[in-house]
Image: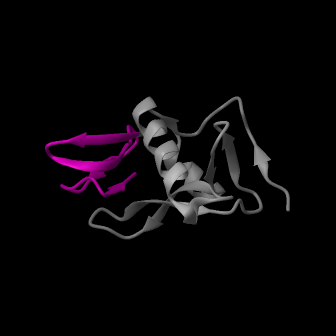
Amino acid sequence: MKVAIDKKVNIVEITDKAIEEIRRIFSTDESSKGKGIRLGVIGGGCSGLSYKLDFSEPREKDNVFDYGDFKVLIDLKSSIYLKGVVLDFKDGLNGKGFVFENPNAKNTCGCGESFAV
C-alpha cells in the first residue's frame, strides 16, 4: 500500500487543545491502537456536507500527517473540503467535543455539524 506523507503542508490545523484530547483518547481507548485519527467529509446534514472523525487504518492515497505519537489521515476527496479548516476541542458550559472551524464554508447549520461550500 502506498501512503502519501506530507510533513510540510498540513491541510487541517489542529489546535493544542485538540491535540491534547486526541493524545488522551489514544492513551485510554483500546480500539485506537495501531490506527490513526481520520478526518473526513460525508454527504448529509442540514447544509449538504457533514464532518466525520473516527479511528482508521491508513488507506491507499491518504494524506498522512505525523504528529509523533499519532497520525492524522485525510482521504483525497475530503482534503478538498477540509483545506484551511481548524480542528479544535471545546469543553465549556455549552458542551464538550471536537469543533471544525471552516473559513471556506458558505453556509452552516445552526448546530455547526454540517456545511456547504
Asked if residue 107 lies in the magenta stretch, the reply is yes
Question: Residue 12 in the image: x percent, y percent?
Answer: 53, 39
Left or right of residue 81: residue 89: left
Residue visible at 53% across and 41% down in the picture? 83
Residue that sits furthest to the bottom in the current view: 44
- Direction from residue 78 to residue 71 in the image, left or right: right
Residue at 75% from the left image edge and 57% from the top image edge: 61
Query: Going by the image, does 48 lie left or right of 108?
Result: right
Say which residue appears at 26% left-offset and 66% top-offset. Answer: 46
Q: Does 101 sit above or below residue 49?
A: above
Q: Position of residue 49 (x, y in %)?
A: 39, 62
In the figure, 73 relative to 52: above or below? above
Residue found 68% across the figure and 63% down from its top: 57
The quarter in which the N terminus is drawn is bottom right
The total of numbered circles placed on residues is 0
What is the residue that sits farthest to the right in this orientation?
1
Q: In this orientation, which residue lies closer to the viewer: 63 or 28?
A: 28
> 107 or 58, which is in the foreground?
58
> Does residue 50 belong to the magenta stretch?
no
Q: Residue furthest left?
A: 93
Where residue 42 sits: x, y (%)? Answer: 47, 66
Q: Position of residue 84 (x, y in %)?
A: 49, 36
Q: How is the image coloured?
A: one colour
The quadrant in which residue 89 appears is top left
Residues shaded magenta: 88-117
